[in-house]
Amino acid sequence: MTRQDWLLLALSKARNGTFSPVQAQKAMFLIGTDAKRYVGDDFYAFEPYDYGPFSSSVYSDLETLASESKVEIRQVPGRRWSVYSITPEGRQSIDASAKDADPRATKYVSEVATWVSGLSFQQLV
């Protein structure tokens, strides 16, 4: 699976299928750190940032997935940031891609995505 597939899988396992920017960053950081043997070397490279580990490639990949109709990007009213939600096309795509992934990896991604998506910005940073 590609790193975009892992990102889409995590998004599919998030509560309501939605991540805030910090939730997406934290989920991908944890997956890349703790499941490195499954996600491979061509995963996201994170740098320290104001709100924790950061990779601009996470946002680039979310934009690409949105251009493919697999993710919807919605502006949060009264905020400067958007939320990222998986679309039906995205679910269909990841269901096909993830069926060959190691079940231990998909279980871990599910656990991380569920945990991260249940935490607020303040709890994550």
Image (tube, rainbow, N blue to C red):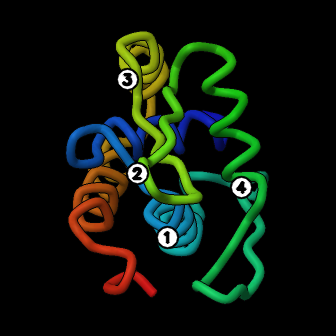
Query: Please, what is the three-letter code of the amino acid marked with disc 1?
Result: Lys
Q: CA distance from mark 3 to mark 1?
A: 24 Å
Residue 45 numbered mark, or none? none
Q: CA distance from mark 3 to mark 4?
A: 20 Å
Residue 2 sits in quarter: top right
Q: CA distance from mark 3 to mark 2?
A: 23 Å
Q: Position of residue 119 (x, y in %)?
A: 26, 72
Residue under label 2: 19
* Residue at position x 71%, y 85% in the image: 49
Q: Position of residue 1 (x, y in %)?
A: 60, 34
Disc 2 residue type (three-letter): Phe
Marks 4/1: CA distance?
A: 14 Å
Which is nearer the N-term, disc 3 or disc 1?
1
Q: CA distance from mark 4 to mark 2?
A: 19 Å
> Would you say the residues marked 4 and 2 are in contact, meaning their CB atoms lie under 8 Å apart?
no
Residue 4 vs 117, above or below: the answer is above
Check disc 3 and report the residue beneath it.
Answer: 99
Contact (Cβ within 8 Å) of mark 4 with mark 1? no
> For numbered disc 2, what is the local secondary structure?
strand
**Which residue position holds label 1?**
26
Residue at (32%, 66%) from the top-left corner? 116
| The disc label shown at residue 43, or none | 4
Screen quadrant of the C terminus: bottom left
The mark that comes first in sequence, 3 or 4, is: 4
